[in-house]
Amino acid sequence: MPVRELTYAEALREALREEMLRDDRVFLMGEDIGVIGGVFKVTQGLYEEFGQERVRDTPISETAIVGAAIGAAIAGMKPVAEIMYMDFLMCAGDQVINHLPKIRYMSGGKLKVPAVIRTQYGLYRYAAAQHSQFYPAFLMNIPGMYVEVPSTPYDAKGLLKSAIRDENPDIFIECAALYRVRGPVPDEDYVIPLGQADVKREGRDVTVFALSYMVHVALSAAQKLGNEGISTEVIDPRTLNPFDKKTLVESVKKTGRLVIIEPDHKTAGVGAEVAAIVAEEAYDYLKAPIVRLAADDIPPPFAPKAYNAFLPNEEKLISSIKKLIKHSK
């Protein structure tokens, strides 16, 4: 039987639609998500099906969007709010940092905030310094906040459904460069447990921890390295809070080598935390120093040549893995 394929955007839309049909408390809100179906067309058709009460166009105010989502969630609704670009999530910084993740804790669990904030980062689209930022490590550093970073259509649908059903606040980070990427997505209802990493490819010589878009880069590199006799294991965390340490540590114990590739900045990035976890829990198994490949510590450039040099890529990953194995035999 042929396997059904959807784009990343279609998988997200299907997840939203199914959860809106399943639970009438679920509603959507955000800039231009209704009448025009969203700038990235993720919500296309939902306004016509569910109406303006459940697919709400909002003013251009991130503070208002997140604040309203928090209030609605406390009142018993299940809001899914869209912040068009991750760069502007911090325009609602007070709500994101001081209210969204802390209200349940400060109320002793009496008040729940089951809100999902969908956002995307514009890397790989030459969108310049104010429309390309990706700062997942910042969100990892906020206790009480769940953070999802799906890399495939399958994961996008399953994780979004889990986030909507979850009773905790979630920041759901999408990648605009993946919206048109196709992949298998089952017809039947399914969810992916939050806090469960995925071994996208098994290997024995080196572990590659790849974040978001870099999962595809890592898989392509692993295929080419396999042709040269190097067996590469690719780990996709899928969620950053909660974080699946067990899958990561077990992989490193098996391979003895770790390369981290991420599209965020290297300094204090996700890779820094990953390296620290391995250093604490699998140090004696390492055959070589941990390698981190990340974006340069500068604002994302607009010029394509500068931008391509700013980000890690497949060529850099392959070269790093070969050097690591050569010097650790």
Image (tube, rainbow, N blue to C red):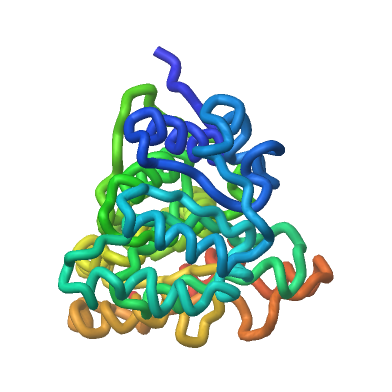
Q: Does residue 7 lie above or below 48 as drawn?
A: below
Does the image show residue 201?
no
Residue at 30 percent across and 50 percent down: it is 76
Quarter of the figure that contains the C terminus: bottom left
Query: In the figure, is residue 252 to the left or right of 293?
Result: left
For this rendering, which residue is in front, 320 or 264? 264
Q: Does residue 278 lie above or below 216 as drawn?
A: below
Residue at 34 percent across and 63 percent down: it is 146
Q: Position of residue 52 (x, y in %)?
A: 58, 36
Q: Position of residue 263 (x, y in %)?
A: 56, 68
Give the mark count.
0
Does the image show residue 275?
yes
Q: Position of residue 287 (x, y in %)?
A: 28, 78
Which image quarter: residue 127? bottom right
Q: Does residue 307 lie above or below 197 as drawn?
A: below
Quarter of the figure that contains the N terminus: top left
Which image quarter: residue 191? top left
For this rendering, which residue is in front, 37 or 211? 37
Which image quarter: residue 38? top right
Q: Position of residue 205 (x, y in %)?
A: 33, 62
Q: Residue furthest top?
A: 1
Query: In the figure, is residue 181 to the left or right of 76?
Result: right
Residue at 70 percent across and 67 percent down: it is 131
For this rendering, which residue is in front, 239 or 61? 61
Query: In the figure, is residue 47 to the left or right of 262?
Result: right
